[in-house]
Image (cartoon, helix red, strand yellow):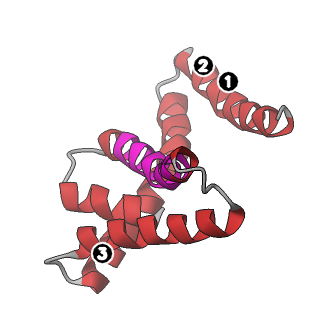
């Protein structure tokens, strides 16, 4: 996840919504790339997947950190992560302050997403 955050920070995206989409896509790409490559080469084993995932994440992080101060990049990545984590809470607060019916939809989505994640996990 740190590698995806670092790439999003280096991309200098405008807002948190764009950053959320970028981090999600990058993180999935970092996870799926070794699975896909090892699967195509018929070498998909737990040990090779662990090494492949580590190499992919490390390479992505090193490429993102190239030409930047690592400590500064880490700080910006941490701030981006906290901003993304707080995004649903801020959406609930803003919709509550608007005194409109939209709060019901936002609250429903906030409750539905964890339920769907747990259902997908147990549905395997």
In the image, is 117 to the left or to the right of 28? right
Are dots 3 and 1 in contact, CB under 8 Å? no
The CA span between labels 2 and 3 is 41 Å
- Which residue is tagged 1? 108
- Which residue is tagged 3? 62
Part of the protein shown in magenta = 20-37
In the image, is 122 to the left or to the right of 35? right
**Which residue is drawn at the image coordinates 45% and 55% (left, top)?**
30
Residue in the foreground of this view, choosing between 6 and 89: 6
Q: Main secondary structure of the magenta part?
A: helix
Are dots 1 and 2 in contact, CB under 8 Å? yes
Residue in the foreground of this view, choosing between 80 and 37: 37
Q: Tell me the crowding category of disc 2: few under 14, some 14 to 19, or many 20 or more residues within 10 angstroms, Cα based.
A: few
**Which residue is drawn at the image coordinates 30% and 75% (left, top)?**
62
- Which residue is tagged 2? 105
Location of residue 83 (image quadrant): bottom left
Which label is found at residue 5?
none
Q: Position of residue 10 (x, y in %)?
A: 21, 62
Residue in the foreground of this view, choosing between 8 and 103: 8
Residue 61, can we see it? yes
Instruction: Assess whether residue 116 is covered by the magenta stretch.
Output: no
């Amino acid at each position: 996840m740190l590698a995806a955050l670092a790439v999003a920070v280096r991309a200098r995206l405008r807002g948190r919504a764009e950053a959320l989409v970028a981090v999600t896509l990058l993180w999935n790409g970092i996870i799926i790339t070794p699975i896909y490559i090892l699967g195509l080469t018929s070498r998909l084993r737990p040990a090779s997947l662990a090494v492949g995932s580590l190499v992919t994440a490390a390479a992505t992080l090193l490429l993102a950190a190239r030409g930047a101060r690592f400590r500064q990049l880490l700080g910006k990545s941490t701030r981006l992560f906290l901003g993304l984590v707080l995004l649903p809470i801020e959406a609930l607060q803003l919709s509550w302050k608007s005194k409109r019916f939209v709060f019901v939809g936002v609250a429903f989505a906030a409750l539905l997403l964890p339920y769907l994640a747990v259902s997908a996990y147990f549905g395997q």
